[in-house]
Image (tube, grey):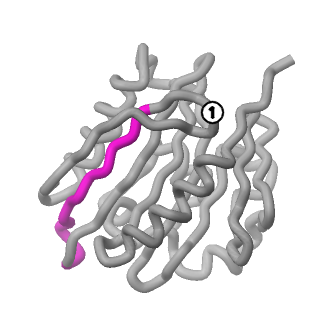
């Protein structure tokens, strides 16, 4: 599959491979994407997130839409964190509706969802919803975990997501949690 980071993080063109440990394509970090270290700043959707020491995030080069940043934690098994800001194009009225949309997409693309945990969370200092879903896939063996936090604020959907394997989840979740605590919303003029 050939897809830009912006398309991934916008959730508009997810395929089975995206939820099943085959995204992003290998070597996307060697392409002409913008490399981020220390802090990613999104001037379009007005948010930032600290990138932990030793990691690099990547986003599309202009003039591609600037939605967010992706970080590969492991190529095999694939573990990927991404942060996104996108307009609420579905017209969801609240975060619970957005969560249900995302879970519907996951169900359509998975062979089976074996468990989902829902709870309140925070993205930086702002209240959000979080779900952790365990699922299996049609094309790949094994179980995958998708951990996603969603927030709706002034017509913009903000997400912080992790796709990983069960044996990596504790370690990868610690990185995601650290980044989520550092997430900041910039005020609009």
Q: Position of residue 105 (x, y in %)?
A: 29, 43
Q: Nearer the viewer, residue 36 or 105?
A: 36
Indicate whether residue 80 is drawn in magenta: no
Looking at the picture, does residue 59 appear above or below residue 28?
A: above
Indicate whether residue 131 is drawn in magenta: yes
Q: Which residue is mark 1?
A: 125
Q: Residue at x 23, y 58 (%)?
A: 134
Q: Position of residue 8 (x, y in %)?
A: 52, 53
* Quadrant of residue 19 within the rendered picture: bottom left
Q: Main secondary structure of the magenta part?
A: strand
Quarter of the picture containing the N terminus is: bottom left
Q: Residue at x 57, y 38 (%)?
A: 123
Q: Nearer the viewer, residue 16 or 101?
A: 101
Q: Which structural element holds mark 1?
A: loop
Q: Residues within 10 Å of mark 1 (few under 14, many from 20)?
A: few
Q: What stretch of residues is rendered in magenta?
A: 129-141
* Quadrant of residue 184 within the rendered picture: top right
Q: Position of residue 154 (x, y in %)?
A: 62, 17
Quarter of the picture containing the C terminus is: top right
Looking at the picture, does residue 40 appear above or below residue 48?
A: below
Q: Residue at x 39, y 33 (%)?
A: 120
Q: Nearer the viewer, residue 2 or 71?
A: 71
Q: Residue at x 45, y 62 (%)?
A: 173
* Quadrant of residue 111 within the rendered picture: bottom left
């Amino acid at each position: 599959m050939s897809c830009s980071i912006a398309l991934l993080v916008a959730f508009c063109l997810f395929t089975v491979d995206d939820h099943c440990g085959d995204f992003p394509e290998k070597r996307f970090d060697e392409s002409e994407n913008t490399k981020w270290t220390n802090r990613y700043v999104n001037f379009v959707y007005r948010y930032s997130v600290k990138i932990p020491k030793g990691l690099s995030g990547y986003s599309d080069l202009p003039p591609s839409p600037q939605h967010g940043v992706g970080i590969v934690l492991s190529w095999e098994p694939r573990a990927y964190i991404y942060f996104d800001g996108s307009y609420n194009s579905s017209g969801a009225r609240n975060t619970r509706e957005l969560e249900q949309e995302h879970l519907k997409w996951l169900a359509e693309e998975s062979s089976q969802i074996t468990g989902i945990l829902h709870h309140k969370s925070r993205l930086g200092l702002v209240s959000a919803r979080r779900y952790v879903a365990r699922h299996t896939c049609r094309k790949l063996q094994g179980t995958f975990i998708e951990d996603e936090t969603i927030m709706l604020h002034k017509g913009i959907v903000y997400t912080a997501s992790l796709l990983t394997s069960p044996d990596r989840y504790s370690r990868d979740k610690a990185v995601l949690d650290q980044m989520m605590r550092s997430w900041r919303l910039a005020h609009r003029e």
